[in-house]
């Protein structure tokens, strides 16, 4: 959520920010409603002050008149009662006016709040402008020694690659048919060594972020109240991507939602709290099952393990002091951690600076990491895929956007309460990460060479054998 005070002072900044992100939000309408609300609020406070003043002033007068009534003549009694009724009516009249103003303010609140929640975080000035994800800018690439992503897989390895679906099916790593039978499209089951590899990747990533970089390991709920989804910025714009549990229809007081990332739970735990400044930065990591409806169109590049409704993810979150330079420092650190992890896995990757149109509503800046997947991309004349990048990680810098919505604050050196800053990043999401792992580490005989860093997590297994795999 943006600061309404700053919006009032510089609405054009937020109008330009929304335009840069291709987000349509009625900021002039919000300011109009905001002014009406503020005017009514001022009137209400003036009436309350007047009501308090009058009550204080007429209290002694009413007491005096009531005393006079006890000994007044019949003729004086009528006049005293009339005067007493007039005095007593003054606060009642103001009370009715205050109630009317309360009702008018209450009618404006829902639309005011809804419009404010829809206003996106303006992108940082150094984020490149763009119309779509096609305008994202490559920052740098990395590949293991001896592998050149500008050349085909066959040129690098000496044989044609098999797409991950072929490898998965031949090695018995997943069962898509039974997954679809049980839960519908884009569902699957990890089986045998596929499940072992899936868990090995998660355990390696979780140990890497918590042991090597001292992120506090956390377990968080993945079934959450709507307030957590709104507070972290996934609602209202992302409601169509979330699974909704309608508990209110079953007599419960509130509905629940399945989280699409552990970030929601990690951030939600400090909602409505004032954090001890000495505890900042708070560095947390969780591994959790994530759920997304993934309503996008299906295609060859989204088949198999790429775009699915349920997956597991190691997520890192940082809550830090409200200083831009500190947020930028942690953003760089988060990316460095993931780069080191991918280098241990020997997976080619690139850093992609997201343009303004690809940031989403809540991010001031976002950098994606994409891994090279030989089985993706257009097909050559011989039917072999050309290979392409596929998103596996995303690191976001949000400043106080989430913390303001969550009412998450700390006390600064002067004792003032300040909204904190937050950042988040994918450490590793599986089974999508298995796509580049299988495709990049496949061998000519169809087996998969397991990276050395995973050996301890695979009970010493170094190769996934593919005796049943037929030549492509």
Image (cartoon, rainbow, N blue to C red):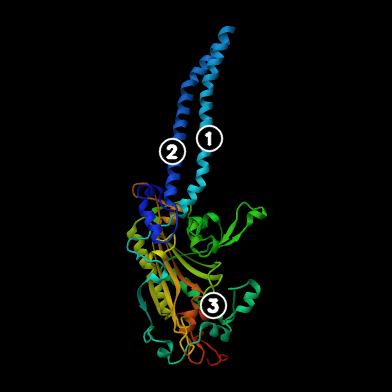
Q: Residues within 10 Å of mark 2 (few under 14, many from 20)?
A: few
Name the quadrant containing residue 177.
bottom right
Q: CA distance from mark 2 to mark 3?
A: 55 Å
Say which element carries label 1: helix
Q: Residues within 10 Å of mark 1 (few under 14, many from 20)?
A: some
Residue named by callout 2: 39
Furthest-right residue in this view: 250
Residue drawn at the location 56% of the way across and 70% of the way down: 310
Q: Name the side, left or right, on which 196 lies relative to 368.
A: right
Residue drawn at the location 55% of the way across and 89% of the way down: 466
Q: CA distance from mark 2 to mark 1?
A: 14 Å
Looking at this view, is 454 or 185 the one in front? 185
Q: Measuring from the top left, give residue 70's x and y in whole percent.
A: 57, 11
Q: Measuring from the top left, give residue 394's x and y in whole percent.
A: 43, 68
Residue drawn at the location 44% of the way across and 48% of the way down: 30
Total count of labels: 3
Q: CA distance from mark 3 to mark 1?
A: 58 Å
Q: Measuring from the top left, give residue 335's x and y in whole percent.
A: 38, 70
Circle on res. 100 = 1
Q: Earlier in the sequence, mark 3 or mark 1?
A: 1
> Can the viewer see residue 126?
yes
> Can the viewer see residue 294?
no
Circle on res. 303 = 3
């Amino acid at each position: 959520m943006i600061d309404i005070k700053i919006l009032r002072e510089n609405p054009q900044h937020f109008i330009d920010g929304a335009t840069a992100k291709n987000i349509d939000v009625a900021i002039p309408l919000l300011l109009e409603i905001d002014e009406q609300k503020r005017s009514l609020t001022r009137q209400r406070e003036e009436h309350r002050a007047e009501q308090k003043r009058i009550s204080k002033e007429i209290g002694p007068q009413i007491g005096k008149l009531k005393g006079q009534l006890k000994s007044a003549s019949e003729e004086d009694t009528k006049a005293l009662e009339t005067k007493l009724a007039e005095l007593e009516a003054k606060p009642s009249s103001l009370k009715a006016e205050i109630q009317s103003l309360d009702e008018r303010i209450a009618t404006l609140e829902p639309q005011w709040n809804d419009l404010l929640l829809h206003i996106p975080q303006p992108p940082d000035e150094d984020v490149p402008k763009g119309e779509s994800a096609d305008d994202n800018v490559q920052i740098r690439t990395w590949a293991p020694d001896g592998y050149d992503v500008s050349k085909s897989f066959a040129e690098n390895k000496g044989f044609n690659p098999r797409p991950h679906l072929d490898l998965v099916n031949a090695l018995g790593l997943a069962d898509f048919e039974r997954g679809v039978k049980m839960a519908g499209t884009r569902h699957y089951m990890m089986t045998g060594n596929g499940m072992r590899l899936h868990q090995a990747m998660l355990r390696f990533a979780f140990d890497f972020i918590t042991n090597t970089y001292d992120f506090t390991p956390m377990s968080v709920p993945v079934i959450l109240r709507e307030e957590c989804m709104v507070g972290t910025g996934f609602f209202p714009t992302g409601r169509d991507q979330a699974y909704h549990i309608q508990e209110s229809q079953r007599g419960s007081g509130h509905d629940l939602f399945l989280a699409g990332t552990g970030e929601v739970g990690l951030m939600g735990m400090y909602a409505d709290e004032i954090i001890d400044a000495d505890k900042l930065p708070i560095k947390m990591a969780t591994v959790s099952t994530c759920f997304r409806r993934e309503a996008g169109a299906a295609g060859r590049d989204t088949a198999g393990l790429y775009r699915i409704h349920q997956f597991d993810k190691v997520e890192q979150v940082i809550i830090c002091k409200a200083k831009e330079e500190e947020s930028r420092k942690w953003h760089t650190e988060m990316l460095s951690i993931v780069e080191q992890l991918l280098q241990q896995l020997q997976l080619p990757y690139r850093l992609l600076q997201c343009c303004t149109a690809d940031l989403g509503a809540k991010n001031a800046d976002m950098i994606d990491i994409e891994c090279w997947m030989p089985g993706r991309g257009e097909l050559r004349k011989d039917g072999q895929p050309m290979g392409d990048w596929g998103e596996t990680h995303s690191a976001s810098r949000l400043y106080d956007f989430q913390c303001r919505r969550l009412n998450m604050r700390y006390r600064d050196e002067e004792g003032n309460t300040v909204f904190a800053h937050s950042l988040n990043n994918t450490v590793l999401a599986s089974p999508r990460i298995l796509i580049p792992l299988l495709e990049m580490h496949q061998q000519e005989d169809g087996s998969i060479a397991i990276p050395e860093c995973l050996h301890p997590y695979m009970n010493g297994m170094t190769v996934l054998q593919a005796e049943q795999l037929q030549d492509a």
